[in-house]
């Protein structure tokens, strides 16, 4: 089915992004995998192209697109090439950006946003903790007020862009007695005494996405590091999480669509029992099922993008999109590996890498179990 989500400007933007990916991401894929991060020069090139400041006002160096469909296009094109590149960049331009644009003071905007847009300042979001997982309300990192400063102690894990980030948005508990209503967001920057990074995590998939543990030992920050309002960090996170989840859904479907297209072509060319394997009824029906599931899921996610564009995307609908797109993606990729046979288990084949890269999407941005909980509560259960 022809998608009706995009207009001519979005198509032109897609062509620009596709050129960027073909010149700066795809030729360096093996290098990024080996070193387990994307070169800073690629970030700077993304900044020069205006990709990092899509949500940032022009006065701070952004392109102020004012249209989430441009975010969607960028996410789709990155995801078609590299799920890991999409993960790294979307954390910055799609997830961190709303915090720094909507919750900051004028002084903070002028201090952070210009370098955010150029790629000189890479960002990360420090929410997940070793003992907490998806339970953000139970985080243990603390920020204790000491005069006009706060002293942060704790740790975060599974942080995308963790080793390269110049600034991390850190969720810390400022009023333990208030539970989820006692969390505050702080900007912790590279070079602050007591802020250290642990090992670069060795993941099953998406090795190109720099992922790390972060440690905070008596990190002292002043009030100018507070993002948003004191003790309202949990509310800020819950308000902005729907955008992260729809971004994940967009990436999931773009990532799997490329592999499904490749698999259809493989099924036409690969011969077994004297005929193309795609003409065998089981494979033909299986591919028909996959194409149908993907197109139906795409229609729902596209509708969620439009809802977000008009400010009507609910947390429940975003949870549905994140949950279902990750299920569809993983199911299709598993079938694509099977159709490729032994070749599907070889790292030199894109389908094998995609299969590994996709598994985490049922875990991050809130596990699928948490997504079901959100949906179930909306049913009054």
Image: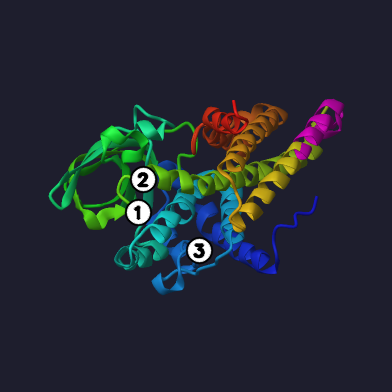
Which of marks 1 and 2 precedes in the sequence?
Answer: 1
Identify the element where label 3 is drawn.
loop
Report the disc number at residue 228. 1
Is residue 190 toward the left or the right of residue 75 in the image? left
Is residue 183 toward the left or the right of residue 8 in the image? left
In this view, 227 is above or below 155: below
Mark 2, other Cα within 10 Å: few <14 / some 14–19 / many ≥20: many
Q: Residue at x 26, y 38 (%)?
A: 175
Report the disc number at residue 233. 2
Residue range corresponding to the magenta coloring: 273-292
Q: Are marks 1 and 3 in contact (CB under 8 Å)?
A: no
**Res. 201 visible in picture:** no
Q: Which tag is nearer the camera, tag 3 or tag 2?
A: 2
Which of marks 2 and 3 precedes in the sequence?
Answer: 3
Q: Is residue 278 magenta?
A: yes
Is residue 358 toward the left or the right of residue 6 in the image? left
């Amino acid at each position: 089915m022809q998608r009706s989500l995009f207009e001519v400007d979005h198509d032109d933007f897609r062509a620009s992004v596709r050129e960027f990916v073909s010149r700066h991401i795809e030729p360096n894929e093996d290098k990024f995998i080996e070193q387990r991060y994307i070169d800073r020069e690629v970030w700077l090139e993304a900044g020069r192209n205006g990709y990092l400041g899509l949500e940032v006002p022009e006065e701070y160096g952004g392109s102020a697109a004012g249209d989430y469909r441009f975010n969607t296009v960028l996410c789709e094109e990155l995801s078609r090439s590299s799920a890991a590149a999409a993960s790294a960049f979307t954390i910055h331009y799609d997830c961190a950006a709303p915090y720094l644009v909507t919750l900051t003071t004028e002084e903070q905007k002028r201090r952070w946003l210009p370098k955010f847009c150029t790629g000189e300042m890479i960002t990360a979001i420090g929410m997940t903790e070793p003992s907490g997982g998806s339970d953000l309300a139970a985080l243990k990192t603390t920020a204790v007020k000491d005069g006009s400063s706060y002293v942060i102690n704790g740790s975060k894990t599974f942080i995308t862009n963790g080793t390269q980030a110049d600034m991390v948005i850190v969720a810390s508990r400022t009023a333990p007695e208030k539970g989820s209503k006692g969390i505050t967001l702080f900007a912790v920057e590279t070079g602050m005494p007591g802020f250290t990074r642990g090992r670069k995590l060795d993941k099953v998939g998406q090795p190109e996405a720099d992922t790390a543990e972060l440690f905070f030992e008596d990190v002292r920050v002043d009030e100018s590091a507070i993002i948003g309002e004191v003790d309202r960090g949990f509310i800020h996170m819950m308000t902005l999480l729907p955008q992260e989840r729809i971004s994940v859904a967009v990436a999931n479907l773009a990532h799997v669509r490329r592999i499904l297209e490749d698999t259809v072509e493989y099924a036409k060319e690969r011969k077994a029992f004297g005929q193309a394997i795609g003409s065998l009824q089981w494979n033909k029906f299986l591919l028909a099922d996959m194409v149908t599931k993907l197109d139906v899921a795409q229609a729902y996610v596209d509708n969620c993008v439009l809802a977000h564009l008009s400010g009507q995307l609910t947390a429940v609908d975003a949870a549905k999109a994140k949950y279902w797109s990750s299920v569809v993606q993983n199911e299709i990729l598993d079938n694509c590996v099977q159709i490729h046979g032994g070749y599907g288990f070889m790292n030199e084949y894109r389908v094998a890498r995609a299969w590994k890269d996709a598994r985490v999407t049922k875990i991050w941005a809130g596990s699928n179990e948490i997504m079901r909980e959100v949906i179930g509560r909306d049913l009054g259960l």
